[in-house]
Amino acid sequence: DVAAYYRRRAEGGVGLIITEGTTVNDPVASPGKRVPHFHGEAALAGWKNVADEVHAAGGKIFPQLWHVGMARKPQDTESPELPSVGPSGMTLPGNILADPMTVAQIEHVIEAFAEAAASAMELGFDGVEIHGAHGYLIDQFFWEGTNQRDDQWGGSMAKRSRFAVEIIKAARAATVP
């Protein structure tokens, strides 16, 4: 029981709890079937219960929002027929496993992070943590080796950082009145 698990942490004096990774609403965001989603009516109802339990115990809680990008192993997911996505379709420099993300795919993922942040606010969470490290999608945009794009999403560090910046801007726009 996830709600009881996090409630126990708050009862034990943890002041701020950041959940395990929860996926945004993109069909290839998850690394596996058992990873929790932060979208969909049933999942969000469960997460509201988690936030309520943590607050009842005096704690604060943020969901960790993420998309694993090319770190996904399709055979372990609910959509094994779909290819993983990444800025250049690479897991490592030169190891191309998929086509580069289209601009439409990039914009969809940015919106998915914004929608998840808005859901967190609506459910009563105290904030969100956007996972941008450890080789997952946002991190894949930062690195020259996995982002070899030559458009507005790649090239210079400023352009490679744009994906993360746009996610933050969209999340803020969706949550700040």
Image (tube, grey):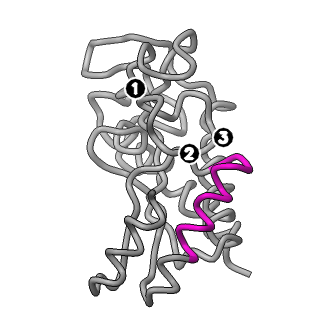
**Sequence order check: which comes first, mark 2 or mark 1?**
2
The image shows residue 82, relative to residue 3, as above or below, that is above
The image shows residue 136, relative to residue 123, as above or below, that is above
**Sequence order check: which comes first, mark 3 or mark 2?**
2
- Near-viewer residue (118 or 102): 118
Amino acid type shown at disc 3: Glu
Closer to the eye: label 2 or 1: 2
Q: In this image, 128 relative to 90: left or right?
A: right
Q: Identify the residue at image location x=29%, y=38%.
A: 135
**What secondary structure prevails in the magenta region?**
helix
Q: In the image, residue 138 lies at what x, y percent?
A: 42, 44
- Near-viewer residue (158 or 2): 2
Q: Identify the residue at image location x=57%, y=18%.
A: 79
Closer to the eye: label 3 or 1: 1
Residue 37: mark in rendering? 2
Crowding at mark 3 (Cα within 10 Å: few <14, some 14-19, many 20+): some
Q: Identify the residue at image location x=48%, y=34%.
A: 30
Quadrant (top left/top right/bottom left/bottom right) for the N terminus: bottom left
Identify the residue position indicated by label 3 in the image.
107
Q: In the image, residue 140 lies at what x, y percent?
A: 36, 36
Q: CA distance from mark 3 to mark 1?
A: 19 Å
Residue 24: mark in rendering? none
Q: CA distance from mark 2 to mark 1?
A: 15 Å
Q: Which residues are magenta?
A: 39-52
Identify the residue position indicated by label 1 in the image.
72
